[in-house]
Amino acid sequence: MNKRKGHWAYRLLVLIFVPAILGIIVNRIDRKTETSQFWTLVNRFLYAFGDSQIYSDLMQTIWRFALGFAIALVCAVVVGVLMGRFKRIENALIDTVRLLRPIPTAAIIPLAMLVISGIGNPLRIFIIAYGVFWPLLIHIYQDSKDIKQTLIDTGRTLGKTRVQIFCGIELRTILPAIMTSSRIGLAIGLLLGVTSEMLVTGDPSGIGYRILDYERSFKYPEMLAAIMMLAAFGWAIDWAFKWIERKSIPWYKERHESF
């Protein structure tokens, strides 16, 4: 009972804290814009939510984010399982992983611009996939390596095919690692997607580019609206992922109770 009361107390603090922060932001916007009319700023802020340009840019960001994340997930599962299950592949790739993983994704951008043709969508998708790939790979590799050989041998004794062993034993064992790393990768991918739209020129689209353009044009209410829409999208994909997690690994209850 006390825990439930504390839970609602935290929600009440958030409801008080968030409007206070927004009030401070609006006050700063009011000082930096030419107009000093509060309701004019509020009207511009609300009107921005009906601007089709913001939604078009947000859809561009979502498309790049989804494609980059999907590429990273597939590659991480394949490479992680191969490294975890086959010693020769692990020995061949482990030093390369240790070398490339600590490099910040932003440091790869200049080199990627020389290698990848086109500095618009292909480069931005690569940045997302590259940054998301490493946390996925490490988690999947570690869990795949920890799979007990006894389980594999039992499956073979029961006459299971290689595909059945992978889907029924190996994939089921590493699925919690995939979910855990994917949750981390979602935040990293969205961050890199927006950052790449701000840094990479050649394609003026995406919510990151739009936020930067509003800032440069001193359209602070519109910029705040775009940021709020981006935050809403981030919350939505996190909620959707938690729902998928509950359905895909119902036996892993401790993950469902975490943040």
Image (spheres, grey):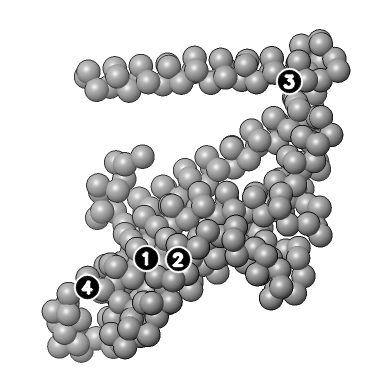
Q: Nearer the viewer, mark 1 or mark 2?
A: 2
Give the mark, 1 or 2, whose residue is nearer the N terminus. Answer: 2
Secondary structure, mark 3, is helix
Question: In terms of depth relative to the viewer, which is nearer, 17 or 91?
Answer: 91
> Which residue is disc 3 drawn over?
29
Residue shown at 45%/62% (left/top)?
102
Circle 4 is placed at which residue position? 147
Is 254 rendered above or below residue 9?
below
Q: CA distance from mark 4 to mark 1?
A: 15 Å
Q: Secondary structure at mark 1?
A: helix
CB within 8 Å, label 1 to label 2: yes
* Residue 101 image label: 2
In front: label 4 or label 3: 3
Which of 83/239 is in front?
A: 83
Residue 58 x, y percent position in the rendering: 70, 47
Which image quarter holds the N terminus?
A: top left
Please tell me which of labels 2 and 3 falls first in the chain: 3
Q: Is residue 151 above or below residue 224?
A: below
**Amino acid type at image mark 1:** Ile
Query: The C terminus appears in which quarter of the rendering?
Result: top left
Tag nearer the camera, 4 or 1: 1
Residue 181, by quadrant, is bottom left
Residue type at mark 2 is Arg
Q: Local crowd at mark 2 within 10 Å, few (<14), some, or many (≥20)?
A: some
Residue under the image location 50 percent in, 63 percent down: 103
Q: Is residue 143 left or right of residue 148?
A: right
Image location (x, y in percent) of residue 161: 28, 88
2 or 3: mark nearer the eye: 2
Pick whichever of labels 1 and 3 is earlier in the sequence. Answer: 3
> Spatial distance from mark 1 to mark 3, Cα to Cα?
43 Å
- Tag 4–tag 1 contact (CB < 8 Å): no
Q: Is residue 70 visible?
A: no
